[in-house]
């Protein structure tokens, strides 16, 4: 047993040692062996392969050999090739591999443990000293639009690098080696057909250069692919290139149809086509170029993709109103094919298309043509069943239809105001004449008398003048019919007739205005039951009065509205529009403007005149030719040169005068403008100088004063010559009072018996001045009571009653009286016949009282003496009472005083001067305005105070009183 154990220990130890050795071997990375570098210059890719180890991660280092600059250093995961037993890894260079030499080294990696670097493998570039000339890489590279490309320039040995230009752009270069420089172009735009040039030049010798070209484009992109048949046997496939690849020539796109190379043919607008001898039903199109590939498919039955060829040998059989077309097909299979054909008909630059259907269609009839017209036609067809597309158009065919009789002319008439007129018809168009017109024939026919007269006119005449007066002289019929026919080589047209009215219609009662809107004059009228054959609307320029250019339109019976449109309507022109029945009876009359404009000239004959400080403007009506619209009124302006100040706006065309009032001295300009709804005219301006009228005023005043002086002189002369009559008529002598009783004693106040008619009270009222009395009427039944009051002694504040007789005017002439007292007394008592009247009563400041007995007479006289004149008073006992002699204070009441002088002092002035009114209220003559009993003293005082006034007032009296005996 011990021997066995001894033998086992070495085995165990050997196993442990082997295990440690194996683990160390596994943890130790193997250095790559037999490194091989294979370049692909077109793709700028390096394929690196090597042997050794079981590691999957490797560190790869790539350097630019000459400058020992690292280009790539990183961990990579290599692919193990089971066939070759080598590890492989590919790297793509940003620069072309020809630019400079590259050095490659590799080492294995197991986690943090790496092997030693492999031996360096050098990929030689073209910048070796042995290649001494200029070089540029890559050469003729094809790249995608929008990509980036790096170019390098290898300078010749001994040369100096200058610059690199991409197209026309100088680029910044990067040095790669002693002789190599590179540029990188990003976002490259599509190049033209010859590509984009990249040029490298020497800094010292510009002629030393090198260059290359790059082609920037797109991979192919297909669209709209389909196949069809033209002959029901073969196939023609078409497609479009969705974009231009910008690659041409040997770099162009190559196409194949169902794996067969296709010789494409361009049809324009990127439309390509490819043919196959037999229809296969399923089609696949492939396209490829240097930048990529694309494919597209289509499938269909042959009867669903029929597109006929163009009809051949097109011909026509022509008539006046129609034509027959014929053609043939190039394939027999069309004879059994249901076809739909389209004919394009061209005439007078108008195109119409007509469609016809039939099996194997080879002929068709064109109807509704016009005689003597030139036409051009072409035909194309398609399959009627499972229509796919129209086939190609045939070659155009031109022909001309035959002539035929003309159409009926459109005839109308117009009568002028002088009974002249014209028969008018519209020229026949080429479509209406159906051939050249040879002549026109106009026939006048009287239906009642069956008389007719025909005139033949040349083909270029479209009007025949007539005279209604002459026509009326040759016929007794109330209407004449004019008939017009046109003639060409094929015969006469149907006749067109119009009735000539033998009287001119009155338009005044049916005139109205019409507005132009929406391209025409909108007319509306009531239907006339007598117009059984329709209506005629004519219009012409309103300024035309004789043989006007007329336009008209005929309407069917029952029409009640129309829109009149014409290419001849012009703005600013008034048109007369008339509605006639077919029997030429005028039914309605309108006037209107297509568009109103401002008047074309200013108002005519503007005139101005001055009267006093007023200025009158007048002008004439705007001529119709210059109105260009309805005159709505006139604007009157004050023209200050710098601006126009509106004075007035006159409404209405007839307002053609205006007055400017109250102008001061100066020069004025006035502008008058007529206006329509479109605006004002240019305006007529007139000026005037307004002068002061002082001379005229003075002259008028002198004339007035002279006339007045003359009239006064004549009146004065007349009064002087007739002074005796004037004095008798206007200033008769005042009779002196005369008493019948004994009035030799001292006169006292007379108590005149009251009149049976009026009693006057002097009353005082609180609201009145206490110094003034008021006259109150006393009824007759209170007369006796008044007498009793007068007889009694009264001591009261109530005012006394004064009784007066009614003043009776004697119309007999006044006779002169003797101045004796008896005559005066008797005349005074006869109060019913006296010519004396009392104008008022002036009371004193004291209480006014009337006493009937002698005891109070002195008191009475005292009261009267201070106030001037005392009225005559009659005692109530009707007996004469003794009157005490007058005191000096009673001067104004000392008896009756006849009229002797004229006191000019008014009561108001007397109160202001002495606070007393002497003799106020003196009786006056009926025929005189002077006081009858003025106070002598007051008169003297008045003369002293106002001698000039008294003398001035008495000149007329002195004149009258200086009558010659």
Image (cartoon, rainbow, N blue to C red):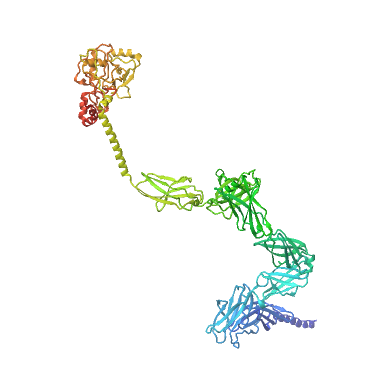
* For residue 4, above or below residue 575: below
Q: Is residue 874 above or below residue 701?
A: above
Whole-percent x and y of residue 349? 64, 62
Quadrant hosting residue 567: bottom right
Residue furthest left as drawn: 888
Measured as percent of width and height from the top left, residue 140 is found at 63, 79
How many marks can you see?
Answer: 0
Give the image quarter of residue 170. bottom right
Q: Residue furthest front?
A: 474
Q: Picture coordinates of residue 805 (x, y %)?
A: 31, 17
Extreme residue toward the bottom, this view:
130
From the image, which quarter does the N terminus lie in?
Answer: bottom right
Where 83 sits versus 636, above or below? below
Location of the C terminus by quadrant is top left
Horizontal and vertical percent for residue 336? Answer: 80, 65
Is residue 253 shown left or right of residue 755?
right
- Say if residue 618 shows up in the picture: yes
Asked if residue 658 lies left or right of residue 911, the reply is right
At x 71%, y 69%, the residue is: 238
Whether residue 598 is visible here, answered yes or no, is: no
Q: Nearer the viewer, residue 654 or 675?
A: 654
Depicted 499 relative to depicted 52: above or below: above
Frontmost residue, 842 versus 932 = 932
Q: Nearer the viewer, residue 150 or 312?
A: 312
């Amino acid at each position: 047993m011990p021997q066995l154990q001894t033998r086992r220990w070495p085995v165990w130890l050997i196993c442990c040692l082997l295990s440690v050795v194996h683990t160390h071997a596994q943890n130790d990375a193997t250095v790559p062996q037999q490194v091989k570098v294979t370049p692909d210059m077109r793709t700028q890719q390096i394929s690196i392969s090597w042997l050794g180890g079981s590691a999957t991660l490797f560190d790869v280092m790539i350097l630019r050999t000459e400058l020992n600059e690292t280009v790539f250093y990183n961990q990579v995961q290599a692919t193990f090739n089971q066939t070759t037993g080598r590890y492989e890894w590919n790297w793509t260079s940003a620069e072309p591999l020809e630019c400079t030499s590259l050095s490659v080294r590799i080492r294995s990696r197991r986690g943090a443990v790496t092997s030693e670097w492999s031996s360096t493998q050098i990929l030689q570039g073209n910048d070796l000293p042995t290649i001494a000339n200029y070089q540029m890489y890559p050469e003729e590279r094809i790249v995608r639009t929008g990509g980036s490309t790096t170019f390098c320039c290898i300078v010749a040995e001994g040369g100096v690098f200058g610059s690199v230009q991409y197209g026309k752009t100088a680029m910044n270069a990067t040095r790669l080696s002693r002789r190599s420089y590179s540029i990188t172009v990003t976002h490259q735009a599509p190049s033209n057909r010859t590509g984009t040039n990249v040029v490298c030049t020497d800094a010292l010798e510009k002629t030393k250069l090198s260059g290359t070209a790059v082609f920037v484009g797109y991979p192919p992109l297909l669209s709209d692919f389909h196949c069809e048949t033209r002959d029901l046997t073969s196939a023609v496939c078409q497609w479009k290139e969705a974009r231009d690849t910008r690659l041409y020539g040997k770099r162009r796109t190559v196409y194949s149809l169902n794996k067969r190379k296709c010789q494409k043919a361009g049809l324009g607008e990127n439309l390509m086509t490819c043919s196959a001898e037999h229809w296969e039903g399923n089609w696949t199109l492939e396209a490829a170029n240097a930048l990529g590939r694309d494919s597209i498919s289509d499938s269909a039955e042959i009867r669903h993709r029929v597109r006929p060829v163009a009809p051949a040998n097109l011909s026509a059989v022509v008539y006046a109103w129609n034509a027959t077309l014929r053609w043939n097909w190039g394939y027999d299979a069309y004879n059994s094919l249901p076809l739909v054909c389209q004919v394009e008909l061209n005439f007078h630059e108008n195109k119409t298309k007509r469609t016809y259907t039939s099996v194997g269609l080879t002929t068709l009839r064109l109807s509704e043509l016009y005689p003597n017209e030139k036409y051009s036609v072409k035909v194309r067809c398609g399959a009627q069943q499972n229509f796919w597309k129209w086939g190609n158009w045939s070659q155009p065919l031109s022909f001309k239809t035959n002539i035929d009789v003309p159409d009926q002319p459109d005839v109308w008439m117009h009568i002028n105001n002088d009974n002249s007129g014209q028969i008018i018809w519209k020229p026949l168009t080429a479509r209406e004449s159906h051939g050249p017109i040879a002549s026109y024939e106009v026939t006048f026919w009287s239906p009642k008398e069956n008389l007719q007269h025909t005139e033949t006119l040349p083909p270029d005449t479209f009007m025949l003048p007539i005279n209604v007066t002459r026509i009326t002289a040759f016929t007794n019929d109330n209407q004449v019919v004019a008939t017009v026919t046109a003639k060409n080589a094929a015969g006469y047209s149907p006749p067109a007739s119009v009735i000539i009215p033998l009287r001119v219609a009155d338009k005044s009662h049916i005139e109205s205005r019409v507005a132009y809107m929406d391209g025409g004059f909108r007319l509306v009228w009531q239907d006339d039951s007598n117009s059984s054959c329709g209506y005629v609307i004519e219009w012409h320029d309103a300024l035309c009065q004789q043989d006007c250019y007329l336009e008209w339109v005929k309407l069917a019976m029952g029409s009640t509205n129309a829109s009149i449109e014409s290419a001849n309507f012009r703005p600013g022109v008034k048109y007369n529009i008339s509605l006639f029945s077919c029997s030429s009876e005028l039914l309605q009359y309108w006037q209107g403007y297509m568009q109103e404009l401002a008047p074309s000239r200013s108002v005519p004959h503007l005139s101005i005149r001055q009267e006093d400080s007023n200025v009158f403007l007048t002008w004439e009506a705007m001529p119709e030719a210059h109105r260009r619209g309805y005159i709505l009124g006139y604007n009157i302006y004050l023209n200050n040169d710098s601006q126009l100040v509106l004075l007035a706006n006159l409404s209405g065309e007839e307002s053609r005068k205006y007055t400017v009032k109250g102008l001061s001295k100066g020069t004025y300009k006035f502008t008058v403008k007529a206006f329509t709804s479109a605006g004002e005219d240019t305006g007529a301006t007139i000026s005037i100088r307004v002068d002061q009228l002082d001379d005229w005023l003075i002259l008028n005043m002198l004339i007035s004063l002279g006339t007045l002086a003359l009239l006064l002189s004549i009146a004065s002369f007349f009064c002087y010559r007739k002074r005796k009559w004037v004095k008798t008529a206007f200033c008769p002598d005042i009779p002196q009072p005369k008493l019948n009783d004994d009035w030799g004693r001292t006169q006292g106040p007379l108590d005149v018996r009251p009149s049976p008619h009026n009693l006057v009270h002097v009353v005082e009222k609180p609201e009145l001045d206490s110094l003034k009395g008021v006259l109150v009427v006393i009824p007759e039944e209170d007369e006796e009571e008044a007498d009793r009051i007068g007889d009694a002694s009264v001591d009261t504040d109530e005012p006394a009653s004064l009784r007066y007789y009614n003043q009776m005017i004697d119309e007999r002439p006044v006779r002169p009286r003797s101045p004796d007292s008896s005559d005066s007394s008797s005349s005074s008592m006869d109060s019913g016949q006296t010519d004396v009247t009392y104008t008022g009563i002036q009371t004193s400041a004291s209480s006014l009282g009337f006493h009937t007995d002698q005891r109070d007479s002195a008191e009475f006289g005292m009261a009267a003496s201070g106030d001037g004149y005392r009225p005559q008073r009659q005692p109530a006992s009707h007996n004469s009472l003794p009157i005490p002699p007058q005191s000096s204070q009673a001067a104004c009441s000392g008896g009756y005083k006849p009229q002797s002088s004229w006191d000019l002092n008014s009561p108001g002035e007397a109160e202001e001067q002495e606070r007393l009114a002497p003799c106020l209220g003196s009786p006056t003559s009926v025929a005189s305005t002077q006081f009858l009993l003025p106070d002598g003293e007051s008169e003297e005082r008045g003369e002293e105070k106002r001698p000039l006034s008294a003398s001035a007032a008495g000149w007329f009296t002195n004149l009258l009183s200086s009558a010659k005996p």
